[in-house]
Amino acid sequence: MSDATLILATERLALSTLTVEDAAFILDLVNQPSFLANIGDKGVRTLDDAKVFILDGPWRRGQPPGCGQFLVRLKADGTAIGVSGLLYRERIDVVDVGGAFLPEFQQQGYGLEAARALIEYGKTTLGVREIVALTSEENEASIALLAKLGMSFDRIVRMTDDDPGTALYS
């Protein structure tokens, strides 16, 4: 029995907290070529790594209540298809919306549907005044999604000391 908590639901999706029961899915997702190219290598190589990542990784550690990455499932059959969430980025003092989906579930509007719902949740339930998005300058799919959300390029930020630059959209 899962101890996941439902965060929100849309017409097609259910977003819930990640649990260690999701470790195999997370292991697969974070090692997809698209994830590695656009988000980066999280160093998750085993099921145990995935469990630690879920319990104490950057998607949970230091996040205020209500923030984090959430498991995205299809409401129709419960299939896990990706993660999406709101993350507080202390270094640049912003809350950003983002996500990642398995390749077979990309380009079907799921990311847009999840992001719209999360922005509404962040503003109405969490009281976040402004929600931005972060992406690499080369991630054309994310940039197109952000345009559909009404966001546009704002500036380049440095997420870490060795970050060559991440595009911030608002």
Image (cartoon, helix red, strand yellow):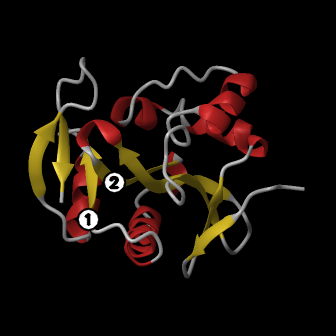
- Pointers 2 and 1 in contact (CB under 8 A)? yes
- As drawn, the residue found furthest toward the bottom would be 11
The circle drawn on residue 89 is: none
Q: Secondary structure at mark 2?
A: strand
Q: Quadrant of residue 3?
A: bottom right
- As drawn, the residue found furthest toward the right would be 1
Q: Secondary structure at mark 1?
A: loop
**Residue annotated with mark 1:** 130
The image shows residue 36, relative to residue 110, as above or below, that is above
Residue 15 location in percent, x, y? 60, 64
Is 38 on the left-hand or right-hand side of 149? right
Q: Amino acid at mark 2?
A: Val
Q: Nearer the viewer, residue 2 or 100?
A: 2
Q: Residue at x 53, y 60 (%)?
A: 66
Is 19 on the left-hand or right-hand side of 60? right
Residue 147 location in percent, x, y? 19, 65
**Residue annotated with mark 2:** 95
